[in-house]
Image (cartoon, helix red, strand yellow):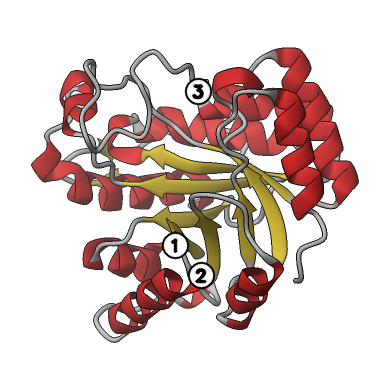
Amino acid sequence: MELGVFGLSAKATLHPAATAKLAVRSEELGYTSWWAGEHVVLPSPRVPDSPMEPTDPILDPLVHLAYVAALTHRLELGTGIVILPQRNPLVLAKQVASLDVLSGGRVILGVGAGYLEPEMTAVGVPMAERGRRTDEYLDAMTALWNEPAPAHHGRFVSFQNVDAHPRPLQDGGPRVMVGGHSPAAFRRAVARGHGWIGNGGSPRDLAAHLAGLERAATEVERPARLGRLTITFMPVPGPVSPEAAREYAGLGVDRLLIYPLPLEDPADVTSYLEQHADLPR
């Protein structure tokens, strides 16, 4: 089980000097990946489902990861997650391919369908269509990265007689991690993702999600090109004990993400990462 770092593109950790120090230190400590989340806008006033106050600062994940790519040598760079239906898939495919080339093939693309209705409405995406858009956008991006003559004709995106280079450095494009805890998200992960990414408060929560993925595997076909479905999991909230880490590893977690809340002091975040760097793998 590998350890990754999540969420340091927000609040007190987003400033250039703090990011530089934390990214270099994370690599020194043996963390293997660095993950950034996304909210383009946040509901104001805050609604119960919103994870942040509307005035909490959070950087665009791809811009942030490009900065981290220049500071590090080995850290994989993950979006955890990009709200895919809010993005233009061709523009996002170009951005992700560009980051993959500049980082030496270190990008992991985590995507999700979104859940905050005020945010999606502000961006102009109907909530009812977000799942279908997510599926179609993934198919369109995969075609643009991989096909000799890229083309896609769907309800939400259609193109042909175009191409986009450079292609991602990684063969087949960056690995795609599909986020979410609904039956639809589990089916999407099985059918279109190299892996699944999720969160929860305990190994028991993870076990329930894994059961959902197992059910999904009986309902949809998994393309051979995707290989084994990998599992990325973020325990929230609070510290992760050695006992819990062993349980996560025993359940088959490939990558455990450490989220050093509350992100109010970079020095506290550094200490948090140092304390978790030696968790059982």
Q: Position of residue 240 (x, y in %)?
A: 63, 59
State left or right for residue 278 relative to residue 216.
right
> Badge 1 is on which residue?
193
What's the residue at 71%, 68% (across, down)?
242
**Which is more N-terminal, label 3 or label 1?**
3
Q: Which mark is residue 60?
A: 3
State left or right for residue 185 relative to residue 173.
left
Q: Given the image, on which type of amino acid does mark 2 rest?
A: Leu
Q: Given the image, on which type of amino acid does mark 3 rest?
A: Asp
Foreground disc of the pair 1, 3: 3
Q: Which mark is residue 215?
A: none
Q: Given the image, on which type of amino acid does mark 1 rest?
A: Gly
Q: CA distance from mark 2 to mark 1?
A: 7 Å
| Image vertical order of residue 127 relative to residue 18, above or below | below
Tally of marks? 3
Q: Which mark is residue 226?
A: 2
What's the residue at 59%, 29% (across, down)?
263
Label pair 1/3, CB-CB below 8 angstroms: no
What's the residue at 77%, 35% (across, down)?
270
State left or right for residue 113 relative to residue 277.
left
| Image vertical order of residue 189 relative to residue 273, above or below | below
The single residue placed furthest to the right in the displayed view is: 28
Residue in front for this viewpoint, 23 or 221: 23
Q: Position of residue 230 (x, y in %)?
A: 55, 70
Residue in front for this viewpoint, 65 or 1: 1
